[in-house]
């Protein structure tokens, strides 16, 4: 671990790159009578969903 840095494992990196936020989607949890789902975000995706 670098001085003042953070410890990153291979598993952490895999989780970071597989995050759906990068392709413009976020997870919305169940609320009242609505089911949980993924929705498109307002920001422009960093990677196309087809490549993700």
Image: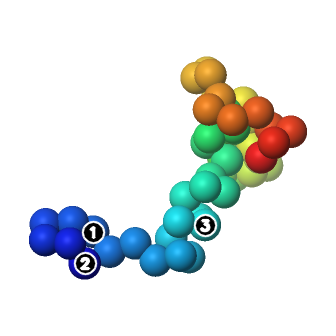
Q: N-terminal of the two: label 2 or label 3?
A: 2
Q: Secondary structure at mark 3?
A: helix
Label 3 near label 2: C-beta < 8 Å?
A: no
| The quadrant where residue 42 appears | top right
Q: Is residue 16 left or right of residue 36?
A: left
| The quadrant where residue 45 appears | top right
Instruction: Report how far apart the C-alphas of labels 3 and 1 lie in the structure.
Output: 16 Å
Residue in the picture at 55% in, 58% down: 16
* Residue denoted by label 1: 6
Q: Quadrant of the N terminus?
A: bottom left
Tag shown at residue 14: 3
- In the rendering, at what x and y percent does residue 23 appear? 69, 37
* Above or below, comparing residue 16 to residue 22 in the picture: below
Q: Label 3: few (<14), some or many (≥20) within 10 Å?
A: few
Label 2 near label 1: C-beta < 8 Å?
A: yes
* Above or below, comparing residue 42 to residue 25 in the picture: above
State whether residue 33 appears in this view. Answer: no
Residue in the picture at 50% in, 70% down: 12
* Residue denoted by label 2: 1
Residue in the picture at 53% in, 76% down: 10
Front disc: 2 or 3: 2
Q: Secondary structure at mark 2?
A: loop
């Amino acid at each position: 671990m670098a001085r003042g840095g953070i410890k990153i494992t291979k598993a952490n990196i895999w989780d970071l790159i597989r995050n759906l936020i990068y392709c413009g989607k976020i997870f919305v949890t169940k609320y009242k009578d609505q089911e949980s789902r993924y929705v498109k975000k307002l920001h422009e995706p960093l990677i196309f969903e087809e490549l993700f």
